[in-house]
Structure formats: structure tokens, C-alpha cells
Amino acid sequence: MLQFLFDTLSRSSDLALIALGLSLVYGLAKFPNIAHVQYAMLGAFASVVLQRAGTPLALALGMASLLAGSLAVLCNLWVFSRLRRQGPAIAMIGSLALAMILVAAALAGHGASPLAYRLPLSAPWVLGPLFVAPNQALAMGVTLAVLLACTWLLLGTRQGRAMRALACNPPLAAAAGLDAERIIHAVHFLGAALAGLGGALLALNTGAYVNLGNDLLLPIFAAAILGGLGNPLGAVFGGLLIALAETLVTNLNIGWLYGQPMAFVPAGYIGAASFVILLLALLLRPYGLFDREVRRV
Amino acid sequence: MRIRFGITLAIALAMANTAHAVTLGAVLPLSGSSASIGEDQRRGIDMAVADINAKGGLLGAPLAVKIEDSADGATGALDAATKLHSIDKVPVVLGEYSSSVSIPLGQYLVKQGMVHLNIGSSSPAIRQIGASSFSLIGLDDLSAQFAAKDILGLGYRKVAFIAPNGAYGQGIDGQFKKYLQAGGGSVVAEVLYTPGQSSYRRELQQMQRSQPDVYVYSAYGQEAAVINRESFELGISKTPWYGIYLSMCTADTPAQIANGQIGMEVASLGSAGQAFAAEYQKRYGFAMKSSYSSYAYDGVMLAAAAIAQAKSADPAKVIAALDQLGASFAGATGKLALDADRQRTEQPYDKLAYEGGSLHAR
Amino acid sequence: MFDFCLHVLTLACLYGLMALALNLQAGYAGLLNFGHIAFVGVGAYAVGIGRLAGWPLPLSMLAGVACAMLLGVAVARLGRNLASDYWGIATLAVAEIVRIVVLNQSGMAGGAQGISALPGPLDALPETAQPLAFAVLGLFAVALAAWLSARLAASRFGRALRLLREQPALASCLGYDLGRLKRSATLASAAVAALAGSLLAGYTHFVSPDYLLAAQTFLVWSMLMIGGAGRVAGVLLGTVLVQGVYSFVPLARDLLGLGSETVGALRLGLIGAILLLCLLWRSAGLLPERLRTLP
């Protein structure tokens, strides 16, 4: 049971930061940014390369996050600020093209083989039935700390209030004197910095590899949608629910159905579990689970 | 300026067309989720071209291999094959890795009367591609049979099996189970995982619950690295681990985790195989990532030998030469011994163990 | 060279059918269907499963269209009370579920390896005539679909769809049943897309779960958006352009004479760069929709 809870938390912490970043940007920019997961891939590469070159891990993680954020600001300046005016579909296709370019850059720069941190291998901590890897604990701890900081930033500061105001009602926010352009840049930076950090932490387990972003695309979008697009903290819970569904499917012994001691849903269906949960959730709550926006008919 | 550029381009094109007497084609997954295998196949091809050209080339001129990206899909592979057929006019095409790409690729090539050399797909369905498709790689029934026999010989009976949920994993899973059960063993847990996940902890623990004697796996690149790391972190690596194609399973795994694993691999004990492994190490600065590079190397070597024997690059003559050569040709992966279906019947494998940071015969 | 151009033309026609089908939903009605490829996949797999079951090709194709329309009803029903972007992701989820199911059905659908040696519609012709004949067949199909599409756009139904896109509340006030409009658009789209899928399977003589990847949906979407959603000529131009870029980029690489290490990265990067430049240059599409405005 303990292991079950831990696996669920660990998987949701893998998704949390990147999904949070996506949802944050979606709230303002109002288009699904496919390139977002590529920021995570580049963040992973940046962090691993820096660490292997001798930078301390904490510094490498921070620099990777800053690099990803800066890249996103440039992309916003050159690409999205122009495409967004033509509607979300155009901006989405633009982000798709951008994602191709970013993947190509990684493929040309490093090649297709994975690249791991140069860290000493430490034995897992054994807590009763629970096996915890130190790296994993580190990743989960950093994720939790950053999530708390983001919550405070969004809910407890002037800047956070400005971001939320702009997301909810742009004309009103502009009328109140908010500098929309500046806030949009700040949010792009923050969203991508979160993605870059998320990718860099993910690489503690998987290493950095070219397809890291593409592999994340569908689970991250499912998590963000499940939580309600534009509700950043909802995305974290969306990720948690998806992790729960996946872990449940892999752990549920359905041997009694077949009269055998042990049988499981084939692991190939694990990806379907998150989408089934997503469809069910949307049938029950059409605007995501944590949507509190007031709608008028 | 523009005119001069045009002239340079025209000269470059003319040179590209005349400099090589023979150009072969290859379609590999160079982008997408199998790109790390495609990259290793490319290494093998580049080495073969360098070797042949160092010995004076083919039919008196340097050999070239035109390498195209399949983008890991059937339509991408067909685009590339059509280009190789219609524009580059190559007689022989090598490729691909996934059998869900090699089969449509092979079907197309056979229809055009070109030679298809399968250097990476081991699904038994490859057998049905058609009359000008040759397999240099032993199909799954060979490798699975060898692994099952080896595992039973080591005294293991209850086996947990894990492989990626793709054409390769599904194929080897079915064959392995068949041979293991025929020999008296049983697969007590069977996981075909979704490739590209950030973690396989849950799949590993599911297998752990059936308390197997041995874990059997076949994975590559980042997935193999994650599976090995997590099995270590979960304490599962204390039970023996057996890798089918062990060198690709452990290529990206820290030595401390991989130590103690056993498995099988395409034999590289012959002189040609050892020379290839040494040359690979020298050229790229790391040990062979997988045996897919040696199959690709042998593919180019076999095609060159057939063209040299036929003294022509005409596909029909090359096919006739291949039919003759196939029975006796021996390369870096050992003797081919192609059967009447042009499939490899003999595949020497080595029994290996990972000790002290590298692979050894056991 | 001629054969290669025929191949590119044929693929452009098949993708053109898919893009025209998507245009019915996304261009006219403004429905964000990110699971469009599911309809194509159903059509393609109908040919494959039909072969395993020993059905004649026309029957398989008809069955594929019928199944795709059933799926269309289900997907449209899902959209009854979802906002557009949530529906978009819901359709993507449906398409992924379909893909994962066929991937794991090794008995009925060939599993990851797919189904090979499929029958094509023109197998009776001699081998050498087939590429040309298939290109002609593709052109004919796409011309028919384009004509029907343009007729539809000009009809009362087409106007209703555009009203649904621009002013759903007004459309509702004018007495249009929005649910029914969305359903009709989705059904028509599903039928055309399934037909395109059957033809693609017949052309490649093969079908596998890779045909159902989400990336394929995005490819069709990029054809639509780069050309100009909502206008038949724009959609066709976008299709030709994007398919052309995908097919001819390897030739450009040969001209540059670069080594084999760069093949994968260069192909991906050039395609991305050309698409992005097109979007930045004409961000409303190359041939944007002309909307009639009342003074």
C-alpha cells in the first residue's frame, strides 16, 4: 500500500512541474503550446551537459531552468506574439513547427543516444516495504518546494494577482492599468522555466534524450486538461489523478476473473488508462475538475 | 553571383553522379523513437563503405551508400524508397529496424524488382515479403529458441518477461514463450511496456509479485537504462537478470548495476566479428552499442560481394549472385546460410555475462 | 524522377482528402478535432481486417466508412456539452485509445506489426501502370471531394456551419439545432476521412498502428492552417505545399552534399523551419477564407 502511494506520488511529481507550466501559459496565451514539452527536453540536456562539465547539480538545475525560460521568451517574441493574433489553431501549428526545430537542434547537437548525469550510484533507502532512491527523493522534494513557491507566487503576491487578472479578463486587466505584454513575457518565462526544471529533474531517472519531450506530450496535456486549462494548480491534481489511474491499472490483480492466482491488465494499456480517466472526467465535469470560473449562458 | 552558384551546383551534381560507379541505398529510423538504433545501423554502414573504399572500391570506383530517414514510419520509409528507386536508381536497399516499417518497405522494393536486405527486423512475418528480400538477421525464432534453451539449461523455470510493446517486443515475446513452455518452463509474468515512459517502477513491481526465478528482458537505449536503474532501486536486481541481446540492454547502464547480468548476444568471436568490434571501438571511442551496427556492416559487405561477383549492379544479376553467395557468405555476424526463402538459418550466438564493467563469455 | 513525382502527387491527393474532410469540421464549423486521424485509421484498418476476414475490397471500404461514421456519432455526442478546446483534447483521447487498442490486438488487427499484403483498388492493372493510375484515381477523388466541399460551403448548410463557428448564440436564436449541425459536419468528415484511409492502405498495401499516431493529425492540421482553413483552394494548396516539403527536403539535402550524420536532424529541422516561415509570412494562411461582410 505504501509502495502504491509512493509510486503514484512519484509519477505525479514527474508530470507536475511541466503540466503546471503548460497550464499557466495556456491561461494567458489561450493556445495549446506543443513546443512546451520541448523546453523540458532542452532543460534536461542543458542540465545534464552542465553537470557533466563539472557544475554542481543544484546550479546545473537552476541554470537549465533559466535557459529554458529565456528561450521561451525569445520564442514568444519572435513567433507566438505574431501568430496568436490569428487564433489558437495557427499558434498551435506554429508551436508544432517550432517543436520540430527544437528536436532537430537536439538531434544535431547531441545525437540520438541518451545522456545521463555523472552521479555516484547510491543504494536505495529501505523503509519497511518501501524502496526509495535518493535521486527520486531529491526530485520529489524539489518539485514540492517549487510547487509551494508557485502557489504562493500566484495566490499571495501582486504579480500573481496580475497574472490571474489578465488570464480571467484581459480588457478589464488592461483597463486597470496592467502592462499585458510584460506579464505575458513573465508568464512565458515562468512556464518554460518550470518545464525546464521538470525536465532536468526527470533526467535524474531517465537521462536526457531527444524524444523526452515527445514522450511527455500526451500525458502532460491530459493532466493539464483534466485539471481545467488555465487553472495551474488544477493541472497538478490532474497529474495526480492520471498517476493514480495508471498505478491502479498496473497493480490491480484481476486473476479472480480468470480463476488464476495472478493476472493483470496488459501493461500496453497503461497509456489508455489516463485517456479513459480524462474522458470520464470530461463527461462528468465538462470544464475540467477544478474549474471555478463563472459562466453565463 | 547567382550564376556562379548555379554553375558550382551543376558541377557538384555532375560529380556526384559520376564519382561513384555504384550507389546503394539505406532506409533507417534516424529520427523518432528508434533513432538511437538507426544511428547505430548508420555507424555500421559508414564503416563498411570506408573498408571497401580503402581496398579500392567496387567495380573500380568508390562505393557510396545513400542513407535516408524513414522518420520511424511506413509512409516515411515509402517516400525514401521511392526516392531511392526513382531518382538515385540504386539496385539494393538496406533497412529498416521495426518490422512494421521493414515489411511495407520490402514489399515496395520487391514490386520494383529491387533487392531488399533486411538488416534489423526479426519478426517471422519478414519471411513473406517476397522473392528479392533477403534477411541477414536471424529471425525471432532463432534468438528466442537460443535464449529459452539457455535459460532452461541454467536451471530457471519461472520466468518474468519484459520487452517494449512494439513489433519487436510482441514478436519475441510470443516466440520466447512458445520455446520456454515447450522446454518445461513457464512465463509467470509478462509485461509489454509502453516505450518512452519516465518510469517503469510499477511494471517491475507487478512482475516482482509473481516471484520469478529470473527476469528476462530485451530493451535498448534510455528505456533499458531506466529499467536497470529502477530494478536496482527496487531491490529487484538481486534476482538474476537475463538480457536477450545483452550488449544493447546494458550499453547505457552504469557498470555497478549491470554487473552480474547474464544473457546472449550475436556472436562476434570469429575473426571478422572481432575485427569489426575493435574497429568500431577505435572509430567511435566506445564499445559497440548494439549488434545492429554489425548487421548493417554485413549488409553492405554482402551487397558489395554480390555486385562484384555479378560484375554489374543490375538488380536481376545481383539477385542471382546473392542466391549463390547467400549459402556461403560469412561476415562480422558469422555465417549467413540463407535458406530457400532467403532467410538466415544459422546464427551463432554467444552466452555472455557482465562482470567487472564489461561483457565476457560464460 | 517521374515515378517519385507521381508518388508525391498520390500522397498529396490522399492527404488532400483527409485535409478536406478536416476542413468540413475545423474550417467551416470551427470544431477543433485533434483526433481526426481516428477516422482515417478506421478506414485503413477496415481494409486490413477485411483482408484477414476474406472480404472483397469494396465491402471492406464500405464497412470502414460505416464504422468511422459510428465513431463520428460517438465523438459528436461527446461534444454536446464540452467547450471547444476540451472537446479537442477529448477527440485526441479517443484517437489514442483506438490506437492503443489496435496496438494490443495482435490476433484481430496484427498488433504492432500491422497487416501487410493488403489489396489495392487497382491491383488488376499491370504493375508498371499502377503508379500513374493511382495518381489519376487520387486526383479524381480529391477533385470530387473539393467540388462537393465547395458546393456545401455555398449552400444553406455551409452558411449555417459558419454561423455556428462565428456566432453560436445567434445561430441558436435563429432556430438552428447546434448539436445536429455539429453532428452532420462530423459525420460527413468521418466518411471522407475513412475513404482516404482505405485508399492510403490500398496504396501502401499496409496498415499499422503508426497510421494512427497523434502526429498524423497534427500533420493534416498543419496542411489546413498553412493553406487557409475554410477555403477549398487554400486547403489544397496547403496540402501540396506541406507534402511537397516533406517529400522534397531529402532532395535538397542531396544538393547540399552533407554527410550521413545529419540526415535525421536536417530533415526534421528544414521541415519545421519552412512551415514556421510560411506561418510567419502569411499567418492567416496562404489563401485565407473570404468572408462576405455586410456593409
Image (spheres, coloured by chain):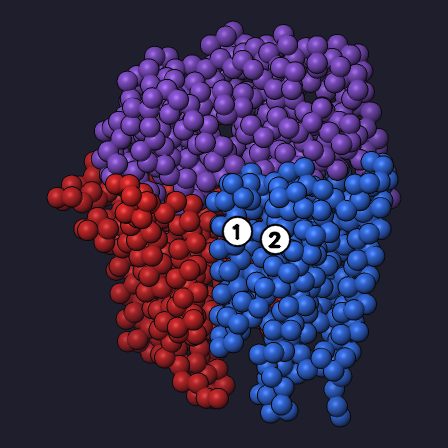
Look at the image and tell me whether residue A186 can be seen. Answer: no
> Within 10 angstroms of label 1, few (less than 14), some, or many (20 or more) residues?
many
> Within 10 angstroms of label 2, few (less than 14), some, or many (20 or more) residues?
many
Which amino acid type is marked by label 2? Gly
Please name the color used to draw chain C.
blue
The disc placed on residue C41 is 2
**Residue B309, relative to residue C270: is it above or below?**
above
Q: Where is residue A98 in the image (x, y as percent from the top left)?
A: 57, 56
Q: The chain coloured red carries which letter?
A: A
**Residue C288, relative to residue B64: is it above or below?**
below
Residue that label 1 marks: C99
Q: Which residue is drawn at 38% across and 76% down?
A: A291
Element type at mark 1: helix
Q: Which is nearer the N-term, disc 2 or disc 1? A: 2
On screen, residue A239 versus residue B172, left or right, reads left
Disc 2: host chain: C
Residue pushed farthest left? A128
Which amino acid type is marked by label 1? Arg
Please name the color used to draw chain B.
purple
- In depth, the one of B361 and A145 nearer the eye is B361
Q: Position of residue C254 (x, y in %)?
A: 73, 37
- In depth, the one of C292 and A4 nearer the eye is A4
Element type at mark 2: helix
Q: Residue at x 49, y 50 (%)?
A: C101
Disc 2 + disc 1, Cβ < 8 Å? yes
Q: Do labels 2 and 1 share a chain?
A: yes
Which picture quadrant has residue B20? top right
Q: Where is residue B241 in the image (x, y as percent from the top left)?
A: 31, 27
